[in-house]
Image (cartoon, rainbow, N blue to C red):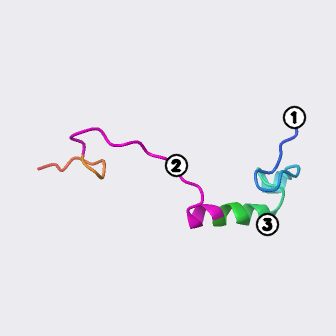
Amino acid sequence: MTARACPVCRKPVVEEFRPFCSRRCSDVDLGRWLKGAYVIPAGPSPEGEAENGADSGD
């Protein structure tokens, strides 16, 4: 099994905080998500599809 690195600071992962090395790095990552630093890109919606992804049902 290969040693994993913390995605925040690159230190070895601690099982208790996996995939991070500490509570601090876990909190840093959560803060990045909450501030919008991580974004999952979405492509344009297909023509004719409702903007919210639901059918209007009329």
The answer to which of 6 and 23 lies nearer the viewer is 6
Q: Earlier in the sequence, mark 2 or mark 3?
A: 3
Q: Which circle marks residue 40 in the picture?
A: 2
According to the picture, the residue beneath numbered tag 1 turns out to be: 2
According to the picture, the residue beneath numbered tag 3 turns out to be: 24
User: Neighbour class for label 1 at 10 Å: few (<14), some, many (≥20)?
Assistant: few
Please, what is the three-letter code of the amino acid marked with disc 3? Answer: Arg
Q: Residue at x 22, y 46 (%)?
A: 55
The secondary element bearing badge 1 is classed as loop
Count of marks overlaid on the render: 3
Lateral position of residue 32 relative to residue 11, left or right: left
Q: Earlier in the sequence, mark 2 or mark 1?
A: 1
Q: Residue at x 79, y 54 (%)?
A: 20
Please, what is the three-letter code of the amino acid marked with disc 1? Answer: Thr
The secondary element bearing badge 2 is classed as loop
Q: Report the magenta stretch's main SS.
A: loop
Lateral position of residue 5 relative to residue 50, left or right: right
Q: Residue furthest left?
A: 58
Mark 2–mark 3 distance (CA, rounded to whole Å) = 24 Å
Q: Which residues are magenta?
A: 32-49
Please, what is the three-letter code of the amino acid marked with disc 2? Answer: Ile
Residue 3 image offset from top left, x and y in percent: 88, 40
Q: Residue at x 83, y 46 (%)?
A: 5
Residue 14 image offset from top left, x and y in percent: 86, 53
User: Neighbour class for label 3 at 10 Å: few (<14), some, many (≥20)?
Assistant: few
Residue 43 vertical placement versus 8 (above, below) = above
